Amino acid sequence: LSKKSPVRYCLEFPERAPEAVTGKRLLNKVSKILNTEVIELLQSRDLIAVLKDEKAVQDCTPDFAALAELDCFALAITAPAQHGRIDFVSRFFAPRQGINEDPVTGSSFCSLAPLWAEKLGKNRLQARQISQRGGQLSLDLKDSRVRITGTTYHYMQGVIRIPD
């Protein structure tokens, strides 16, 4: 495989449906950290901040030092997509894990897929993570599982040897 030919992969994971965070204190704190208004805040493994639109997600400039102080594994931000072919967009920040922004985060879709499936009333979704590198994914929800399909480029090959 060359760097120029994309490879399509499909992975399947258990869904992690998020639950609404009640109270305004944390919502206001996250809005301040993200430097933008958070419309809705939810929690699964990660915090999920729903923003008003795709532009708000794209333009978001988080305070990573303050974000690292939040008591959460990571924070995903999301909003409805502008274009009809894509259902929603997202970005994923994990400074507590040593990654300010992850380019395409499969695990985040275990929570984002059920969230948007409920909001949009459908179990087949198209998503785009709009980090600097970015990526587009197809998501299928069935029987509490999320099937995540996307393309990647084969750039390295290796062998793991286990000593006798």
Image (tube, rainbow, N blue to C red):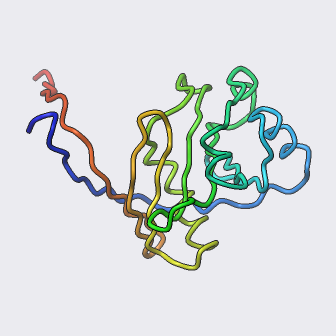
Q: Count how many numbered circles sit on residues in the image.
A: 0
Q: Residue furthest bottom?
A: 121
The quarter of the displayed image where residue 157 is located: top left
Left or right of residue 8, residue 142 in this image: right
Task: Tell me which residue sits at (61%, 47%) in the image.
Answer: 45
Left or right of residue 145, residue 69 in this image: right
Q: Nearer the viewer, residue 42 or 164?
A: 42
Task: Tell me which residue sits at (39%, 56%) in the image.
Answer: 137
Picture coordinates of residue 24, whole percent (x, y): 91, 50
Q: Nearer the viewer, residue 1 or 96?
A: 1
Picture coordinates of residue 23, whole percent (x, y): 90, 53
Task: Tell me which residue sits at (48%, 75%) in the image.
Answer: 123
Picture coordinates of residue 158, whole percent (x, y): 14, 27
The quarter of the displayed image where residue 66 is located: top right
Task: Tell me which residue sits at (62%, 37%) in the image.
Answer: 73
Quick check: 35 above or below 63?
below
Left or right of residue 151, residue 87 in this image: right
Quick check: 43 above or below 68?
below
Q: Nearer the viewer, residue 55 or 117?
A: 55
Q: Quadrant of the N terminus?
A: top left
Q: Quadrant of the C terminus?
A: top left
Left or right of residue 83, residue 152 in this image: left
Picture coordinates of residue 20, whole percent (x, y): 76, 60
The quarter of the displayed image where residue 134 is located: top left
